[in-house]
Image (cartoon, grey):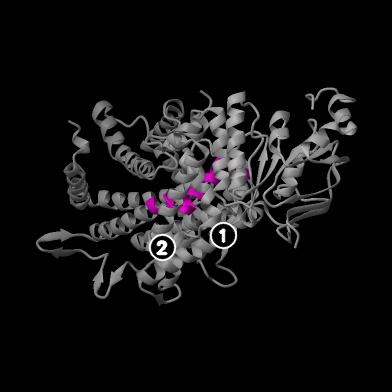
Amino acid sequence: MNLAAHPRAKWIGFALVALALIGLPFALASVGTAWVRIGNLAILFVFLSLGLNIVVGFAGLLDLGYIAFYAVGAYVYALLASPHFDLHLPFWVILPIGSLVACLFGVLLGAPTLKLRGDYLAIVTLGFGEIVRIFLNNLSQPVNITNGPQGISRIDPFSLGSFSFSKNETILGLAFSGPIKYYYILLVILLLAIVVNLRLQHSRIGRAWEAIREDETAARAMGIDTTRIKLLAFAMGASFGGIAGGMFAAIQGFISPESFVLVESIMVLSMVVLGGMGNIWGVVLGAVLLSFVPELLRYTVEPLQLYLFGRTFIEPEVIRMLLFGLALVLMMLYRPAGLLPSAVRKRELSKAK
Amino acid sequence: MSDALLDCAGLDKRFGGVLALSQVGFSIRRGEIYGLIGPNGAGKTTLFNALTGIYPCDAGGFMFAGKTLAGLRPDQIAARGIARTFQNIRLFGNLSALDNVMIGRHVRTHAGVFGAILRTRATLAEEAAIERRALELLVYVGIAARANDVARQLPYGDQRRLEIARALATEPKLLALDEPAAGMNATETLELRKLLERIRADGTTILLIEHDMKLVMGLCDRVLVLDYGKKIAEGPPREVQRDPRVIAAYLGAAGEGEAA
């Protein structure tokens, strides 16, 4: 008998996943609080990957400057909740604002690039990402808006009334550190984001994105306003980036333009590609893997070498890049559509055979 | 207003120094099956592309259901009620047959981002209606059994039918078909003919580019013959067939067209 087909199996599976997600931060905390922080960053990266997946995976528009929207969201949060302008708005006000502003930037990037495809689009988006970062670096004169390369510090953490997400607390005999509290709120927001993504994918708009990716000319002939639908993809993707950026600023308490370099854009794109473009669960997997594996290496490579040889031959950072390169090559050879490819992508990439 | 659905007058289309269409004019009546024939390179597909907004016209233009189509984008023209198929089939190849037709419903439906995210009752109802209508259309063109198959893996004839179903999903007043019988065998062509007659009987006007003369002569009420971008004849198939200029265009100077 097929166990997975059993009606109760679905609910039991669901409950197990829920339990694992609820227990995860305590398991991580028992290894070290740093790991809870890594888990939180992983959630942010999942969030970013989901947003980029709308642009790249659904609509098929290659965006190499996605991190710019993350930056916009982070700076909106930092400016509205820090001593820099002495503004301290609550997070549930700022996150929507950040997402809206990022959304506007998405349209701003989208509008001039609508006629571009493939490589050309990639180049322009890459430039856009750099422009945003350079602006953030230099908007400290003549009026100090972003505080330049020094960045903005002492950013307010999330708080609801007197409940702050950054303080340690003991509730019901369990020690909730700041990162653990953040973990839960991030998880809730992430689950919402996944639901939004799933719903968008299986909707009239989601189908229009697919149509554009498959054949833009045919899509237009079928009455799809490709201009609007593409802009919508940029806007939606960007607003996800904006929310993630806001959460990042709150968790870190400090941001500077250095957090939003090109490599980060490429990292997020790698997560999407590794996991499986267009498949939401694949993208989640890709982001989790690429967030945790490098950290695991950081904590294992050096002690392992010390234990085996008594000294360090290769720096963890070097190993990380080596393995990353190797992983990408292996992927292209054996699973070009990603670890958990979407059915449609798999077909696209098997065209040659 | 006359019973003309589409009027074309003084249409010019230039590609660099080549005049691909020159002073083409014709008029299609409601409920008609109107054929567009001519040797290869005569400008038939160019005319289609000008009609559906892919190319801008250099002079002249189209009036559709009493309104000009000048300056409209392809998607706006589809919204006005002109749907087309492509000579070299342009399906959304990696999507299922059903998805292809559902995408065709886009232009007649309204759900936006917020409807999709919130799954409002209106959105759910619309989504169900889209799927129902798409299935109906697959039944209509006779490929319901293929609904969940990937479009590009369908047999050739079925792909042609799917393209017609997708076009019909946009609820066109005018269905423009670019060589729908190309590559079909005699049986499939006969089936196609029945389908087109049914579509016309159900109230959709058809503009047809076709090389299969037997099909054109048997199916069309009137035909327009193009040669080197110029209209050389127009009228009922029997008359056009005897027109010396048409015979010359097909058999004479070029000598590469099929016998008319």
Q: Is residue A214 magenta?
A: yes
- State the image coordinates of residue A203 (x, y, percent, origin top left): 44, 52
Residue A342 vertical placement versus B106 (above, below): above
Residue A325 vertical placement versus A233 (above, below): above
The 10 Å Cα crowd at callout 2, few under 14, some 14 to 19, many 20 or more, is: few
Between residues B13 and A300, which one lies in front from this camera angle?
Answer: B13
Would residue B235 be found to the left or right of residue A24 on screen? right
Q: Residue at x 38, y 67 (%)?
A: A155
Q: Are marks 1 and 2 on the same chain?
A: no
Q: Main secondary structure of the magenta part?
A: helix
Would residue B152 be found to the left or right of residue A112 on screen? left
| Element carrying mark 2 | helix
* Amino acid on which the number 1 mark rests in the picture: Val
Per the image, the residue denoted by label 1 is: A107
Between residues B84 and A283, which one lies in front from this camera angle?
Answer: B84
Q: Which residues are magenta?
A: A198-217
- Residue A180 in which image quadrant: bottom left
The 10 Å Cα crowd at callout 1, few under 14, some 14 to 19, many 20 or more, is: many
Per the image, the residue denoted by label 2 is: B122
Is residue A257 something one can see in this rendering?
no
Pinpoint the chain carrying mark 2.
B
Which quadrant of the rendered structure holds the C terminus of chain B?
Answer: top right
- State the image coordinates of residue A225 (x, y, percent, origin top left): 60, 54
Between residues B257 and A208, which one lies in front from this camera angle?
Answer: B257
